[in-house]
Image (cartoon, rainbow, N blue to C red):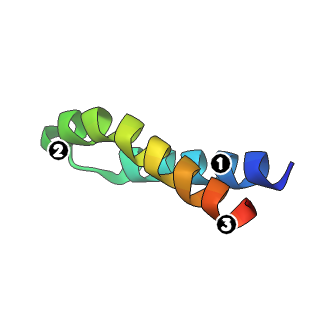
Amino acid sequence: MLAVEMLIGALLIIRLILNQTNPKWRTAIIVSVPILVVLISFEILEVVL
């Protein structure tokens, strides 16, 4: 359950970053968001396991 809460927190942080970015950088960040989510998920799994 803790891993799910941490993943939701990471998604909220990414959403905040998207809301604060300059429109010309938004496309690059949208492309990199899935990569960031996967990396954060692996880090959470490493900490939990």
Q: Mark 1 points at which residue?
A: 7
- Looking at marks 2 and 1 on the same chain, the residue that comes earlier in the sequence is marked by 1
Secondary structure under tag 2 reads: helix
Q: Vertical placement of 19 versus 46: above or below?
A: above
Point out residue 14 in the picture as x, y percentages from the top left corner.
Answer: 47, 49
Q: Which of marks 3 and 1 is nearer the N terminus?
A: 1
Q: For the residues carrying marks 3 and 1, which lies nearer the camera in this image?
A: 3
Residue 28 position by quadrant = top left
Gap between marks 2 and 3, in whole Å? 31 Å
> What amino acid does circle 1 point to?
Leu
Q: Can residue 13 be seen in the rendering of this structure?
A: no
Check whether the beta carbons of the residues at disc 2 and disc 1 lie within 8 A of each other: no
Which three-letter amino acid code belongs to the residue tagged 2?
Answer: Trp
In the rendered picture of this protein, how many numbered marks are placed on residues? 3
Badge 3: few (under 14), some or many (20 or more) residues near its Cα, within 10 Å? Answer: few
The mark that comes first in sequence, 2 or 3, is: 2
Q: How far apart are marks 2 and 1 (CA)?
A: 24 Å
- In this rendering, the label closer to the viewer, 2 or 3: 3
Q: How far apart are marks 3 and 1 (CA)?
A: 12 Å
Q: Residue, x 20% and y 33% (percent of image)?
A: 27
- Outermost residue on the right side: it is 1
Mark 1, Cα crowd under 10 Å, few <14 / some 14-19 / many 20+, is some
Q: Hey, what amino acid is under mark 3?
A: Val
Residue depicted at x 48% and y 43%: 37
- The residue sitting at the bottom extreme is 47
Q: Name the residue under label 3.
A: 47
Is residue 1 shown left or right of residue 38? right
Residue topped by disc 2: 25
Select label 2 or label 1 by which is in front: 1
Q: Horizontal placement of 26 versus 20: left or right?
A: left
Evaluate if marks 2 and 3 touch, with contact meaning CB atoms under 8 Å apart. Answer: no
Quadrant of image for the C terminus: bottom right
